Image (cartoon, grey):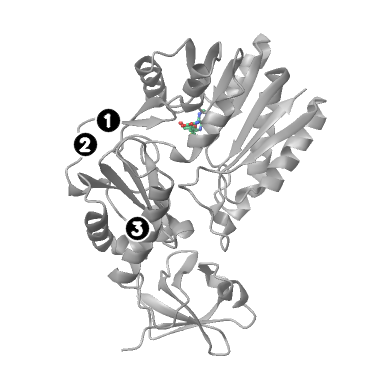
Amino acid sequence: MSLPKIILKQGKAKPFYRRHPWVFAGAISKTENSPTDGAEVEVFSSEGNFIARGLYNSQSKIQVRLYTWNLDQPLDKDFFKSKFQNAIKLRNDLGLNNNEVGCRLVFSEADGLSGLCVDKYGKWLVMQFTSLAMANRREMFADILQELINPEGIYLRTEKGIGKLEGISLQDEICRGTPPEGTIPIQEHGLQFMVNLTEGQKTGYYLDQRDNRLEAAKLAKGRKVLDVFCYGGGFSLHALKHGAIETVGIDQSASALHLAADNAKRNNLGPSRWILGSAFETLAELVKTGEKFGVVVLDPPKFARSRSAIDEAIKGYRRLNTLGLKLLEPGGFLISCCCSGLITMDMMEQILALVGADEKRDIQVLQRRGPSPDHPVAATCLESHYLKCIITRVM
Ligand code: SAH
């Protein structure tokens, strides 16, 4: 039986020949054979030429996610298994697939598996879906992971808000094996961090900043470090290990700060102050006290969740970086991060230029960094380059 077809509008095919994996509703002229949500479909140009195979969801802005450009390749278990094998091979080559360090085993578009992330902590895996069609295939993916990794357990977590965007209704629950008892220790560049994969933020930890935390720490010796949006204290602890004289972490989540204080204790590191509060208000109060820092790290949550939110997000980043600059001593280092895929590196640099001019401070960009390499960027889908980390010196 032939697959349902998606016919694109005239002039809309080019990005998909170039292997961008997201087909938005605006590119689609019509559907044939009534695809159901989650179904495998074939995508054709308006001239009737085959372009790719994908998975359909009428409820999402991304109506088709594309997985193969090969006409004869069904999107079956063997196909997906080979994608998982490629993804795992990369983490093996990076030396990250073991039971000590945490790592992202599968990163959505960047591993050709749009809509699925898999993180590994010790002997446990966490699967997270951002696509209905992929979520519908979760038992198949769990089988594949069981065959390739044989974990103690696979836990399912769904990001808040994604249900609405995709029409997914999933419970956070164990879907294979047994859940871990309590928290799992992971190693990161010589430090131990505790991960609660059932209750912690994201899948329990922010693996993407692993190498940026180390790079920032190398600048911290003999300096006081302000770690804004600190979560489990990652930037602070690495800074202390590299000789920071004191760290101050700010987060609005009390459980994050408990985790941070506990992580500091486990690693015998200090002195640290942990301040519970909204970042913008707390920074403004610190500015009033006149306290200054030698390193300021800004690692906010995503400000731009949709194109319509970009202007507001830019204002937010501008305000945040202004406050950061005001707290930075001359010759100090500002580490400015942004995890909004819709805000590019260029845009962040423009924001820094504006902020520097406003505050009459010269900013030198030392490093333009992305996420750790277990979060690769798909060259055909630059939206997967969501995390930017700009390391600067400010006179
Ligand atoms: N820097 C961390 C990751 C930060 S994730 C690391 O290296 O692991 C973003 C953090 O910002 C989360 O811990 C969240 O609780 C916190 N957060 C979100 N909005 C906030 C706000 N308005 N003020 C303070 N903290 C906030």
Tell me which numbered mark, 3 or 1, is placed earlier along the sequence: 3
Question: Is the Cβ of the residue at disc 1 closer than 8 Å to that at disc 2?
Answer: yes
Q: Quadrant of residue 220?
A: top right
Mark 3 residue CB less than 8 A from any atom of ligand 1: no
Give the answer, above or below, for where 294 lies relative to 45. Answer: above
| Residue 180 numbered mark, or none | 2
Residue closest to the eye, 173 or 267 = 267
Quadrant of the snapshot with the N terminus: bottom left
Q: Residue at x 26, y 51 (%)?
A: 149
Q: Residue at x 52, y 28 (%)?
A: 229
| Residue 105 numbered mark, or none | none
Please indicate whether residue 196 sits to the left or right of residue 233 in the image: left
* Amino acid type, residue under disc 2 in the picture: Pro
Give the answer, above or below, for where 7 lies relative to 340. Answer: below
Q: Secondary structure at mark 1?
A: loop
Q: Secondary structure at mark 2?
A: loop
Residue closest to the eye, 61 or 330 = 330
**Residue bearing mark 1:** 183
Residue 239 in the image: state x and y as whole percent.
Answer: 53, 21
**Residue bearing mark 3:** 168
Residue 23 is at least partly visible in this image: yes
